[in-house]
Image (tube, rainbow, N blue to C red):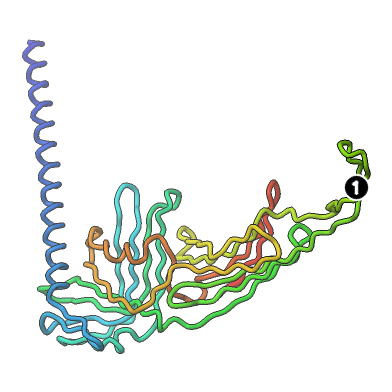
Amino acid sequence: MFIDYYITVRINSDVGIVVGVFILAIFILIFFVLTIIRHGKLGDFKSNIRIERDRIVLPSILELELGRVILDYYKRGKYFELKININPVKKITTDTIILDELCNSGFYAASSKSIFQGPWLHINAPGFRVIKEPYSGIVGLCLDPSKIPVKRVELNIKSEYSGEVVGEVMTNNGGFTGKVNWIYRVTRTPKVVFDEKSGVYRVIEDYTSKSRARSVRLEVCGEVDLAKKKCLTIVENYEPNKEIYGKTRILEERKIVFTLEGCTTCLKDIEQLISDSLLGYAEGKIKAKLVVDIPMGEDVISEVEI
């Protein structure tokens, strides 16, 4: 009787494992089929539009929502999530989108591949969403650097450890340019020493003060929320009394990018364009930061909103 019970339990257990593996295989198959379908829809849309000098010619007459597209892609637990919202919304039915009407304002985009924060991508830009088949859920975004306002800020640090450091940051073509001027006057005094090899006394200059700073750097930091922040170093200076220039990635021309709502694997083109960086501008979201790096001590920092 015990043997019959053991065999029955063992058979039921094996059947349960087989059924579980079969169900898992079905889910994986469904996922891949849906992925192929989604990529096929996005690929078909992209291959059937024309982006001309002043307009996007759509594959057919489509019903669209126009407005500012807010796209967030991030990791939650073991899985990635993609959320897309459009606000405010203007509905139109058309086969042509005039680019000057679509790209009517600037954009803000930030992306991080940090293992501490978890990979994430955020874009806030003018765009559209198709709301009816055969291309329902297709989303287009306009990233136009010419619509970014020109902003310039200056930062200044005076410290006994570093002397005077002046930094400047400016928005430029969707990216940021900057310069750092580090001024430190080393104080020297004459000192008489005996040279044992030659047997004579010599006068040398001895340092009475020297900068404790290892370097000074200029950064630009953009945030999405408390959990998502991206900082880029524009320029780092290791030598006092030298003016150094630098820049972050820039977007030299207008880009129209596309993705599909709900498709976390349809962001390849967008991710390559943003590429672990900070582009564009949003008021209240970006700060310039000047940092004096003090070894074995607390850094001296100045921050200002751009």
Residue pictured at 25% horizontal, 87% vertical: 53
Query: Residue 13 versus residue 82: which sits nearer the camera?
Result: 82
x, y percent for residue 154? 63, 75
Determine whether 82 is above or below 144 in the image.
Answer: above
Give the residue at x 34% y 53%.
75
Report whether 52 appears left or right of 3: right
Residue at (79% x, 63% y) in the render: 185
In screen coordinates, is 129 left or right of 205? left
Up-down: is 76 above or below 251? above
> What type is the residue that disc 1 sits on?
Arg
Q: Quadrant of the C terminus?
A: bottom right
> In this picture, is 68 found above or below 159?
below
Q: How many marks?
A: 1
Assess disc 1: are there few (<14), some (14-19) or many (≥20) residues with their C-alpha within 10 Å of its C-alpha. few
Q: Position of residue 156 (x, y in %)?
A: 69, 70
Left/right placement of residue 303 relative to residue 61 reads right
Depth check: give the residue in front, 170 or 67: 170
- Residue displayed at 10% across by 11% down: 2
Residue 158 in percent (x, y) is at: 75, 66
Corner quadrant of residue 157? bottom right
Q: Secondary structure at mark 1?
A: strand
Residue corresponding to mark 1: 202
The N terminus - image quarter: top left
Measured as percent of width and height from the top left, residue 208 is found at 86, 53
